[in-house]
Every structure is written in C-alpha cells, then in structure tokens.
Amino acid sequence: MAGRRPRLHARMGSIRTRVLAVVIGLLVLSSSAAVLLLRTSLLEDLEDEVQQSLLREAEEFLRLSRGDDPRTGEPLEGDVQALFDAYFDREVPDEGETLLAFLDGELYEARRSQDGAPVGQLRPAVQYWLSLDEREQGSLDTEVGEARYVALPLQGDDAEGLFVVANFPAFERDEIEAAVRAQILAQLTALTGASLLALALSGRILRPLRDLASTARKISDTDLSRRIPVSRRDEASQIAAAFNDMLSRLENAFTSQREFLHDTSHELRTPLTIIRGHVELLELDGTPEERAQTGALVLDEIDRMTRIVNDLFLLARSVQPDFLQVGPTDLRQVVAAAYQRAGALADRDWRLRTGDAVPVVGDEQRLLQALLQLADNATRYTRPGQVIEFGASGDDGVGRIWVRDEGRGVPPEVAAGIFRRRERGADRDPSSGAGLGLAIVEAIARAHGGGVRLVEHTGPGAWFEVTVPRR
C-alpha cells in the first residue's frame, strides 16, 4: 500500500495527467455551458411562444366581437352566444391550448388540443375565472400543471359571457427536457470520445519526453551511445532532438577525454622512463662531460614530452566547435606560406607547384599547420638534398593541398593504419616521436569536412594529400 501511493502521486503529477485533466475540464465546462444555454434558450422561446399565442387568440376573439357574424352578416356586438358560435366554427386550438366559453356562469363550449387540459381537471381554475369582472392575464397551478391564460369577461344584451384561452406548456417543457437529456447524453458520449482521443494523443505527443527520461536514466558515465528515436517535428520531438545533440557532444567530449588520458599515459611513459633512468645514473657519471651529456639528453626528452603534450591537446581540441576559425582562404597562398617556412625544417630540395587560385572556406592557420606536419614527417624519411614538393589544385568542388617526397615511402603493411594515433613507420625509431603528426593532419582535415589520404603513384617516396570542400 505504501508503494502504491508514490506511484499514484507520480501519475497524478505527470504532464499527461495534467494535460488530460485540463482537456476534460475544458470539455466539461464547455459542454455544461452549451447544455445550459440550450435549455435556457428553448424555455425562453417557449415562454415567448405561449405569450404570443395567448395574445393572438385573445386579439382574434376581440376583433371578431367587434365585427359581423360571417354566417348571417349581422353585427355580433351584444350577442354573446352568436359570438361564441362564430368563433368556435372556425377556430382550432394551437398546441397545448384549451379554449373555454361560459354563458351565464355555465360552460357553453370547450375545445382543446391533444395536449390541452380537459375542463374536468380545471374546476378550481374555472371557479376563479368565473369570479373575474375584467380582463386578466396570468398563470395558475392546476392538476395538469401550470396554466397560462387570458380571461375576457363579456357583457351581452341578454346574457353574460366569459371567454378563456389557456395554455399548458408542461408537455412542451417535457419535450424540451427530453431534448436536453438527449443533448447531455450526446455531450457525454463526445466527452468520453474526446477524452480517449486526448489520452492517446497526449501519449504520442509526450512519448519523446518519456523516452528522454528513460534514456537519461539508462545513461552512465561509460555509455553515452543511447539516443531517442525522433520521427516527428513537434515541440516534444525538437526537445528529444536537442537532447540527442547534447548527448552527441557529451559523447564526443568524453571520448576525446578518454583518448587524451589514454594517449597521455601511453606516450609519456617512454620519455619519463628515459628521464628517470638517466637521472638515477647521473651520480655515476664521473666527468663533467658525461654529466653534461646526460643533462642534454634529459632536456631533449623534456622537450619531446612538451611536444607530445601540445599535440595531444591539439587532438583533444579538434572536436570542439571553436577549433577552426574559418573564412575565405586561397589554398595557393597556404601552400606558398608552407613553402617559405619549410626551409628551416631540414636541408632538402624544397619545391612549389601551384596553378590558379583555389578558393575555399577554411582556417588558413590550421591548414598551414597540417602542411608543416606533413613536411616535418617527410623530412624524417628523406635524406639531405632529396626533393620535397608542396602543391595545390582544385576541381569538382574540392580543393587539394599535398606534400610529396622522394624518400623511402610507406610500406604497404603500414599504409592502412598510418593516420591512426601512435602509428609509426615500420623502420622508425620509437623514441623519435609520438606518432601523432599524421593524426593531427587527419583531425584538421576532418574538422574542415574533408580528409587526408596516401596517394598511390608510380614514383618514389610518399605523397600525402589533404582535401577541403570548396563550399
């Protein structure tokens, strides 16, 4: 029982329950207002109709009393009996009406519609009407319900008369109440249908939010791969899509963080081991020259560690939105800038090959950094005097920059994974670097929406090409 209450409170406090409650409440209010307005309008119309019917009958009777007898052509004024005969010859009671004519206190003629009241049920009312001395309009309670009436006492030449037109609206009121009950039933049916539809629609509309909550509960710090299915374009689906985007950014950030920590522990292990070993052996160096040599080696390893850390930070930043500062860039100028700086890297036969301008939208500094990384990589596999060539070209909506050398090239067994982190050439000294240069080039190219590849060619050496979309 204690476990059911929290679930009940949770359901009552859910968005779906609140939305459904609001919809049902609005439907109940609108339906109640519509039924009440319908009933009030119909009853008011009935009252107006009864009132007009009574006045119309009384006016017709009075107009006839001031005219001539249609049968004989004689004036009817003063002849009460003839007036009654002439009136009842041509008059048919309306719905709910009873027409009564009294002559010297006795019933002379009575007519009623199907739902009018018979005289036998109107004795108290008849006695009251016979006591009147002048015209009266009002209502009385009778055995068959309320009677709305107009009573017209008449003074003839040889007799006294009384004409009464009475209307009994109870039957028509019952019809109105039956119509209202039918309307209430129809409204309840519509309310039930609308509530079920609202329940189903609210479930569909809020499904992305439930999926969001479910996914958020299942996410851990080691699994950020779950996503919410999004198939519509409504507001809830937009929230789910935004949540998916946030998860993607978090996943990229966590992946980058894990890779950074893994790479740091992997890449710094070797130089730290070298530094520790030489520092421990420093006291064994017997001459100042040996100690200076050991110190220089330690400093060189520290410099290498600094380069490794900088490269790792660069790779970690490559997935961040602000990694690139893009703008209109001419790849021909990027290649020319790399050519001007490359001479300081090593004694090689540096060459430049460009043609027309190759405009792209990119980060000139990052592209220059990628070219210099490729150039530095080329110096490691070439000898002094060998050719290293820069170039740029563009076609089919793609801009290309490359570095080609005439060195030892890349063995086929290494080429497939050469752009992965920590991948080195087969004959490369592990202590010579961290193997991050080509990974940095690949990260810069990917950030531009392009890529980097090892171009197959027939000449000696290696040819690395970076592609950048021109738009």
Image (spheres, helix red, strand yellow):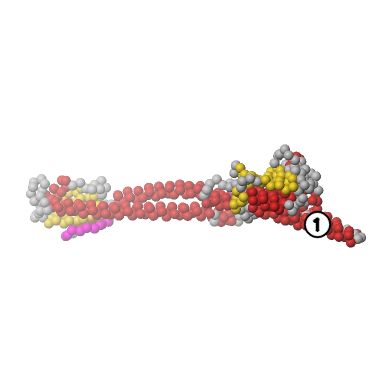
Along the line of sight, the residue nearer the viewer: 217 or 65 = 217
Residue at x 15% of width, y 46% of height? 89
Residue at x 76% of width, y 45% of height? 386
The residue segment tinted magenta is 133-141
User: Mark 1 sits on what residue?
Assistant: 300
User: What kind of secondary structure does the magenta stretch mostly adopt?
Assistant: strand
Does any portion of residue 428 appear in the rendered image? yes
Q: Is residue 241 left or right of residue 424?
A: left
Total label count?
A: 1
The answer to which quarter of the image holds residue 460 is top right
Residue at x 24% of width, y 54% of height? 51
Which x, y percent locates residue 65?
A: 13, 52
Which x, y percent locates residue 282?
A: 88, 60
Does any portion of residue 218 appear in the rendered image? no
Along the line of sight, the residue nearer the viewer: 18 or 435 = 435
Which x, y percent locates residue 353?
A: 67, 45
Q: Is residue 59 left or right of residue 11?
A: left
SS at mark 1 in the image: helix
Q: Is residue 426 magenta?
A: no
